[in-house]
Image (cartoon, helix red, strand yellow):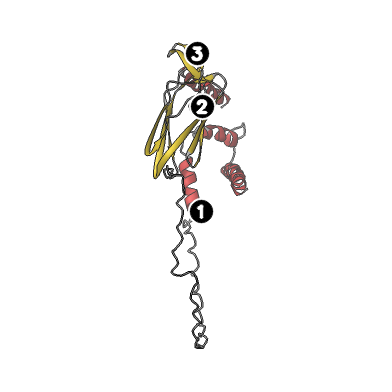
Amino acid sequence: MAYRIITLILLLCSTSATAGLFDAPGRSNFVPADQAFAFDFQQQQHDVNLSWQIKDGYYLYRQQFTFSAAGATIDEPALPAGEWHEDEFYGKSEIFRQRLTVPVTVKEADKEATLTVTWQGCADAGFCYPPETKVIPLSAVRAASNDGQATAIEPMPSTSSRPAFNPPLPVEPRPAPELATSPAPAAVPPADTPARLPFTALWALLIGIGIAFTPCVLPMYPLISGIVLGGKQRLSTARALLLAFIYVQGMALTYTALGWW
């Protein structure tokens, strides 16, 4: 039995080593694009600020930025001046490091207007990311009025220099209106309780049986059998069942306590 256990452990270790042998070399050294170039935006009426937090050892190309609006009219964004850099991908180019903020002025925008921004960056270690595109939803903005002068209101011409005096007409007394009693609000029916899955314990048992045949559980069977049934002494059927029951109940109670907590 010990020989079988050692053989199983060696097989598992060889599988892990084979999987690591064919991994892409050095690929884990580079972070995903969202972490290398963390993008964020904010809109306040006509002003939209686009910002990038660039990780150390990475940079963005100035000439790879494009902006396009759908359902909106914007001014051409003015990118700040970058620093010159030469690499094997684009040669001598202007790049941005650390942090970049690009203000965009929205002249007018519909209710479902969007702003599409595309950029591309690389790492100093020699890896270039594919172009990244983000679609930004814009809030509705009306076009600003060009005429800033307020229109003056002309006074109404008077018919005479002195207004005529009209005595008030007598007002007949009216009976006070009767207050209508409002009907009592109708009782709100209680909300429907969420439907529960019938036979929850049965479903848990069936799911547990299904999980028992998954590949990650199958290697445990010879180990458990060796622990419960192994040894120099031959166990009786009742004792073997008792040991298996104790093992299963211990695992079940442990997972039940973890799930409940």
Other residues around mark 3 within 10 Å, as few (<14) / some (14–19) / many (≥20): some
Marks 1 and 2: in contact by CB < 8 Å?
no
Viewer-proximal residue, 121 or 102? 102
Give the alpha-carbon distance from disc 2 to disc 3, as whole Å.
18 Å
For the point 53% across and 20% down, the residue is 58
Against 156, residue 239 (above or below) is above
Q: Can residue 17 be seen in this view?
A: no
Residue occupied by mark 1? 201
**First along the sequence among labels 2 and 1:** 2
For the point 42% across and 33% down, the residue is 75
Q: Where is residue 81 in the image (x, y as percent from the top left)?
A: 50, 20
Helix, strand or loop at mark 3: strand
**Relative side of 257 to 93, left or right:** right
**Relative side of 110 to 235, left or right:** left
Marks 1 and 3: in contact by CB < 8 Å?
no
Q: Which mark is residue 37?
A: 2
Q: Which mark is residue 85?
A: 3
